[in-house]
Amino acid sequence: MADTLRFEVSEYHERLRKTKERMLREKVEVLIVSDPANMNYLTGYDGWSFYVHQGLVISLDYDEPIWFGRGMDANGAKLTTWLSGDNIRPYEDDYVQNVFKHPMSFVADIVREKGWDRRHIGVEMDNYWFTGKCLETLVEELPQAEFQDATSLVNWVRIVKSAREIEYIRQAARVCEHVMQTAVDSVEAGRLESEAAANVYHAVVRGVGELTGDHPAIFPIMPTNERTSAAHLGWQPDRKYERGDLVLLELCGVRYRYHCPLSRTAYIGDPPKELREIADAVVKGVEETLSFVRPGVTAEEVEARWRQAISGTRVVKPSRLGYAFGLNYVPDWGEHTISLRSGDKTILMPGMTIHLMPGIWLDEFGFECSEPILVTDGGCETLVSFPRRILMK
Amino acid sequence: MADTLRFEVSEYHERLRKTKERMLREKVEVLIVSDPANMNYLTGYDGWSFYVHQGLVISLDYDEPIWFGRGMDANGAKLTTWLSGDNIRPYEDDYVQNVFKHPMSFVADIVREKGWDRRHIGVEMDNYWFTGKCLETLVEELPQAEFQDATSLVNWVRIVKSAREIEYIRQAARVCEHVMQTAVDSVEAGRLESEAAANVYHAVVRGVGELTGDHPAIFPIMPTNERTSAAHLGWQPDRKYERGDLVLLELCGVRYRYHCPLSRTAYIGDPPKELREIADAVVKGVEETLSFVRPGVTAEEVEARWRQAISGTRVVKPSRLGYAFGLNYVPDWGEHTISLRSGDKTILMPGMTIHLMPGIWLDEFGFECSEPILVTDGGCETLVSFPRRILMK
């Protein structure tokens, strides 16, 4: 049994029960899980092995998930999961990046061996780690199975966090404050952008005091000036900050794979009037939206409230206002469930964690000031304490 | 035009010519590129936006690639690529993680608009960023097209590096030496593993002197003791190193997205005899293999030479001996082309960069001592200078 499990085994069992309940509701008899966050959530598995095909096979009538992966990672599964050895199924190394052999053929062998090959099989159809070739191979290998899309089935099980999960996210929030402060301290005229980014990475991984950190699911998004007009550009390695620089900081803290994201905007010098106006409107919009969030309202109602708050200002925000976050691996700390936007009918419940992220990317520049929140019984709690304004240097 | 291009525009044009030559040879009239490294290689595009669907559409009879991506990333494409504005095609935000709308429908619209919808369309079928849902959507939207697997088509164009690419990889090698030294210095009894990992991240991102670094495609693989029996486990955040610790260090330097990987093994104290024996056999095997590598030999012949060198020793190595590396994003610095293993008939050529990575993962512990190499006219050059032995602390 792994000594690195971050939760009681009973909590993993409970997660599995909820997954099977949802499988039944969605008429999925066998579920193939490819998402490493879902693998971790259900079994504890934790390693950087997702660059080759791996996953879990879960059947309604089989107690444990079956882990499959590359031979050299099987010891990793033994060391980091609560699964019994029989349910750790390594494949031989020549399945890796081989045009003649695909790991999903190995998975099909397991499915046939268990007698599950005529069942309704759910796959995470739009997950990064379930490629077109995975689908094609399974369909060819298991012609009598019925395949259906179960892309975010486990993600939706994850949507309400347990007490222990919230504890880790709160700890990640402490790390996040330290990370953001490190970034603000590091953005100084004359300093290499690389140096600031390196300091941020150090803070994310080291954490603060007894709260050690972890590797982040997204790199530090730290563009300057005209690059702030795009949402996902990084720092420029060889450039030094200058007076008059506008710097977006979309960062996070991480604790045992649980993220707490946060965005702020820094300015070296006196910010121009246009930026200050945008900042004022966004901060006011965030505050009005925060006071609206509570259990029972829907994701789209939250976004509508924000839209109302910014109407009549210069703020333009065609993209979603936010998304659920938590446990994750690269490339995203978002959970791919709730989106705060028109059409999302999700009713908010206590224990959900949402990144209220009003990123504004105009043609010439951008502005970000976000709040990661926990939906509580009576409203919502902002997880991070950091000034909501342009951070002037 | 972007001011951050790392290569002359003529080099991007040359890469595109080679890609089209290969498309023709493989009967691909239109190629949809999903791999962010391939996008960067062909256009310069550089951002952490691959967590939503994005890519390039390349047609044999159309001059430039067409970039498609999320609206908020279109400015990023303008700022980092050599493409003309007409060929930057953003989709609306509600295509993101929406069960009713998929970005590949938007791509199908482009394909129809250009009149390419009855052509042979190549897709990167087994690439992380081309999901089962991407395939399903395209097949449904474009019923008259013929789809075929073009998974590593562009990756194979990348296999021989240009002079400028080799320059960046050499620079990444200087950063890599600094990173490995930082790791060895940081692994000390009483220090948090998190602290060591944070120092490594700092070194990777900051680089050394004028050679600034970049974010790594794989996290620092730094397991200790029994965790070294698995290939892809990380550090343990809350643990402090102790005397008698065995630590694997699989790290890299990065320069403008070009990686140089390196593995070593550290030991705090006097290494046990069994580990020393394995180390001696591996190092001898590496040296014999290095003296064998030259243009004209095949990938499988290199592996066979290694196998011969370790026969009769206690070293067991069921997995591939190495792989091509270079430009990349998470989750892998490997290029998914050459594998040093039986069956790989690739003939080595000058300008190829290969990670000779004899990672040994036994049931109780592991040992790693690798060499990233450049195939030269007369043999091969080791890119990194770092002692090939157990690094004792």
Image: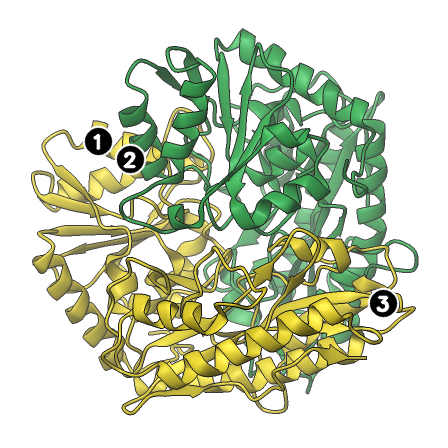
Chain colours: A green, B yellow
Q: Residue at x 79, y 68 (%)?
A: A182
Q: Residue A7 location in percent, x, y? A: 81, 33
How far apart are labels 1 and 3 at the CA level?
57 Å
Label disc, if present, on residue B135 of the rendered structure:
2
For label 1, the crowd category at 10 Å Cα-Cα, with few meaning under 14, some 14 to 19 and many 20 or more, is some
Residue drawn at (62%, 51%) of the image: A217
Left or right: B153 as drawn, with respect to A58 = left
Callout 1: helix, strand or loop?
Answer: helix
* Type of the residue with mark 2: Leu
State the residue in front, A192 or A55: A55
- Residue marked by disc 3: B244
Circles 1 and 2, Cβ within 8 Å, touching? The answer is yes
Sequence-wise, the earlier of marks 1 and 3 is 1
What residue is pinned by disc 1?
B139
* Chain-order first, disc 3 or disc 2: 2
How far apart, in angstroms, are the residues tagged by discs 3 and 2? Answer: 51 Å
- Observer-side mark, 3 or 2, equals 3
- Provide the secondary structure element on which disc 3 rests: loop
Three-letter amino acid code of the residue under disc 3? Gly
Q: Same chain, marks 1 and 2?
A: yes
Quarter holding residue A158: top right
